[in-house]
């Protein structure tokens, strides 16, 4: 049951049997909101909510100045507000029902990602399973998904397990496997296996999965013993990984189209250049505002009236720049750092958690070079877990 709740919160699925476009993360978050209307939310949660409200206030001020209201971005900020309640509700449920550690919780998240990606990759070779995944949920970009199913070039995932977001979640899985291997919570064998499975399956979902190699930042911090353990795992990973990838390419090429997932590899072998069609297109999306007002306060636009991206740029940093300029972008990224700081303080200033949060923050910044995305739900869940755990411990001491 707890596995299902965490899975649905991470993958944010819009099931076909649910009316409208309501997604599972919103449902869990609304339940969390109703719960905390009767129960006090821990102080770290209040701090995060205050930070999001400050960003909403800035967005309103800039919208009034620019005389334009972008509904999409406001609903994005409001949803983030609700997701805080969902994360704290999950943490409350986990801590109340069983005495687990943060590493157990992170391992649960890793297992969720593993299960999803294995199902997604299996569906690429099993047509009935892929069809079932297609019909069980409401998907955007239907024509693209249908083309994927016919050509067998990309895996169909569940909810946010598709396209760019699916690659982002897979990258989180890579980072968590390295973190848990480094801290010794999972064996080096499990670490390597989980890393390789998520890497290969994630590449068929979105090639941004490879950004999860940002997890190697963990090699440069932490205790000497932990760094040596991760270095040993990394060396084994590259040796085993190279052999495994070679075998996979030879075997899997008989059953699926590898051209898209490993396009950059084939491009390097053929032309000596590490590039893809999408990476070349990305370079054309880096355009800057042409007025000082737009540069500093943006145009308060994320989308054009026809639903396309404003200024036709998909790059996350550029979309923020055109929405609320340098000032608003600075406030937004400071908010991300503040959320990490709150989570770190809630952990009792645990050094390992600090290193994980910094790694995830760097990872999110790298992802925004390609597209607009956040992984705040991860930060919320980490902060919520420690907060609820601390409250429970305080109540136990008070009772004793």
Image: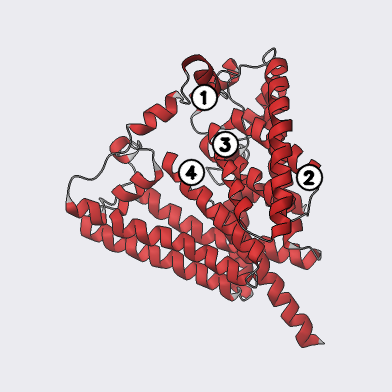
Q: Quadrant of the C terminus?
A: bottom right
State which quadrant residue 308 falls in: top left
Q: Position of residue 262 (x, y in %)?
A: 57, 23
Q: Earlier in the sequence, mark 3 or mark 1?
A: 3
Q: Earlier in the sequence, mark 2 or mark 1?
A: 2
* Number of the front mark, 3 or 2: 2
What is the C-alpha distance between the residues marked 2 and 1? 29 Å
Give the vertical position of 245 relative to 218 (above or below).
above
Above or below: residue 174 compared with residue 33: above
Q: Image height check: is 210 above or below 38?
A: above
Mark toward the viewer: 4 or 2? 2
Q: Position of residue 243 (x, y in %)?
A: 72, 25
Lower position in the chain sequence, tag 4 or tag 3: 3
| Disc 4 to disc 3, C-alpha distance | 10 Å
Tell me whether the residue at label 3 lies in contact with that at label 1, contact meaning CB atoms closer than 8 angstroms.
Answer: no
Which residue is the extreme one toward the left? 291
Q: Is residue 372 visible?
A: no
Q: Residues within 10 Å of mark 3 (few under 14, many from 20)?
A: some
Q: Which residue is mark 3?
A: 210
Q: Which residue is mark 1?
A: 264
Q: Position of residue 99 (x, y in %)?
A: 81, 66
**Residue tagged by mark 2?**
188
Q: Which residue is located at x 55 percent, y 57 percent?
A: 358
Please report the residue visible at 17 percent of the width from the left and 49 percent of the height from the top.
291
Give me the C-alpha separation between circle 4 and circle 1: 17 Å
């Amino acid at each position: 049951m707890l596995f299902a709740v965490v899975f649905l919160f991470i993958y944010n699925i819009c099931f076909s049997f649910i009316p409208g476009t309501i997604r599972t993360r919103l449902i869990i978050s609304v339940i969390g909101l109703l719960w905390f209307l009767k129960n006090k939310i821990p102080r770290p949660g209040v701090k995060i909510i205050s930070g999001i409200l400050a960003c909403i206030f800035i967005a309103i001020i800039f919208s009034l100045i620019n005389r334009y209201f972008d509904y999409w971005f406001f609903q994005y900020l409001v949803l983030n507000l609700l997701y805080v309640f969902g994360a704290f509700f999950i943490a409350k449920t986990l801590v109340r029902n069983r005495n687990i550690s943060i590493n157990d919780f992170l391992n649960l998240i890793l297992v969720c990602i593993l299960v999803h990606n294995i199902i997604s990759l299996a569906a690429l070779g099993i047509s009935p399973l892929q069809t079932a995944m297609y019909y069980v949920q409401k998907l955007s970009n239907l024509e693209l998904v249908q083309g994927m199913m016919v050509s067998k070039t990309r895996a169909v995932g569940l909810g946010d397990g598709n396209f760019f977001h699916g690659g982002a979640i897979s990258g989180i899985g890579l980072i968590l496997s390295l973190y848990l291997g480094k801290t010794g919570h999972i064996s080096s064998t499990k670490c390597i296996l989980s890393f390789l499975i998520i890497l290969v399956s994630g590449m068929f979902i979105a090639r941004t999965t490879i950004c999860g190699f940002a997890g190697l930042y963990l090699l440069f911090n932490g205790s000497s013993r932990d760094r040596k353990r991760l270095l040993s795992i990394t060396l084994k990973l590259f040796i085993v990984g190279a052999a495994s990838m070679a075998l996979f390419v030879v075997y899997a090429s008989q059953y699926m189209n590898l051209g898209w997932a490993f396009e950059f590899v084939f491009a390097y072998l053929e032309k000596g250049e590490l590039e893809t069609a999408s990476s070349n297109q990305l370079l054309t999306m880096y355009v800057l505002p042409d007025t000082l007002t737009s540069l500093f306060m943006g145009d308060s636009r994320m989308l054009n009236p026809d639903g396309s991206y404003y200024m036709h740029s998909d790059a996350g940093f550029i979309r923020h720049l055109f929405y609320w300029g340098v000032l608003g972008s600075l406030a937004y990224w400071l908010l991300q750092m503040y959320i990490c700081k709150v989570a770190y303080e809630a952990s009792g200033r645990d050094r390992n958690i600090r290193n994980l949060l910094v790694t995830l923050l760097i990872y999110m910044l790298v992802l925004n070079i390609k597209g607009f995305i956040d992984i705040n739900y991860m930060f919320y869940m980490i902060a919520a877990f420690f907060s609820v755990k601390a409250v429970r411990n305080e109540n136990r001491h008070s009772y004793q």
